[in-house]
Image (cartoon, helix red, strand yellow):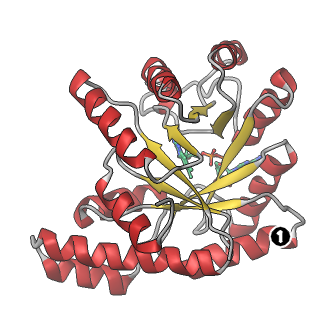
Amino acid sequence: MAKPELSIEFFPPQTPEGAQKLRDTCRKLATLKPSFFSVTYGAGGSTRERTFATVREIAADGFEAAPHLSCIGSTRASIREILAEYAAAGIRRIVALRGDLPSGVGDPGEFRYANELVEFIRNETGDRFHLEVAAYPEWHPQAKSPKDDLLAFKRKADAGANSAITQYFYNFDAYAHFVESVRAMGVELPIVPGIMPIVSFSKLARFSDACGAELPRWMRKKFEAFGDDAESIRAFGLDVVTELCERLIAAGAPGLHFYSMNQAGLTTAICERLKLGC
Ligand code: FAD
């Protein structure tokens, strides 16, 4: 069985201490030999400078760095400028997203959906960038219907996306069904599952509601029963996520993309158990 490629996601740190911590985390995680590290982009471009600075630093350390770029609320001119900066910095991969408008911002700007951003990047820069897009095995929360969401995904592929990274999920069947449905529409691009290690169950539960990821009842009940017992939460979370990864690898997932939350510990522990990257 081919080993899946690893990729690891960071968010841009807000403070010098956070930046130092991320440098240490990145060096630790580099031992897993990921294909790239990606860096998120704040709603409405709020982290434009910090995302760029983080990506530059990772690249200067000799690793492939992929900035996320969201288009909602942006103009074509501002996206063109960002693409030029990334091209000049030697960046070769971008995670292209619609994003969400920050609360209180009414103007959606010149792009409505991520497929328009993918098309724009291709028209402006040809094949310069490998483009990743987002996929939602449990459906995007604003999708009118599963079918509409699949068609929206196909439009991103047709516009020139090279591969996709999914929202995190804990239901293996949702991923398997999504991949099958996409293939049935003739879309062949690799769909890499996004993996969220479980640090704090209560925080994850709040966050999951907002982004449309389901925490299965059997897991929720068990985590709730652990109360404040952080050690049991960590141990059970590690078991659940490792088992999910094992099933995904056995089913032929082309890679695993870890939402590291800028921490090395759990991602490393899961990869060690899976004997990946080491
Ligand atoms: P789209 O693919 O445009 O889809 C958005 C919604 O619109 C879906 O419901 C889709 O069904 C619907 N839709 C698409 N086209 C049409 C159409 N023509 N008509 C009607 N409906 C349509 N957010 C950030 O702010 N920063 C990040 O760095 C970031 N990184 C992410 C990384 C990954 C791997 C993932 C999975 C998500 C990430 N997000 C990030 C969250 C993402 O921005 C949100 O989920 C956002 O709401 C949708 O972005 P999208 O690119 O998936 O949008």
Res. 100 in view: yes
Q: Which residue is more in the foreground, 59 or 151?
A: 59
Residue placed under numbered mark 1 in the picture: 183
Residue 223: x percent and y percent? Answer: 23, 78
Q: Is residue 197 left or right of residue 49?
A: left
Residue 119: x percent and y percent? Answer: 82, 34
Residue 265: x percent and y percent? Answer: 29, 56
Q: Which residue is at a point 49% across and 36% down the rendered structure image?
A: 39
Which quadrant would residue 268 be assigned to in this image? bottom left
Q: Which residue is at a point 90% across and 65% down the rendered structure image?
A: 186
Q: Is residue 263 above or below residue 75?
A: below
Disc 1 on helix, strand or loop?
Answer: helix
Q: Which residue is at a point 52% across and 78% down the rendered structure image?
A: 246
| Quadrant holding the N terminus | bottom right
Q: Is residue 230 above or below residue 100?
A: below
Q: Which residue is at a point 35% across and 46% down the rendered structure image?
A: 28
Which quadrant would residue 23 be assigned to in this image? top left
Which quadrant would residue 103 be assigned to in this image? top left
Q: Is residue 213 above or below residue 48?
A: below
Q: Is residue 155 left or right of residue 22?
A: right
Tag 1: amino acid: Arg
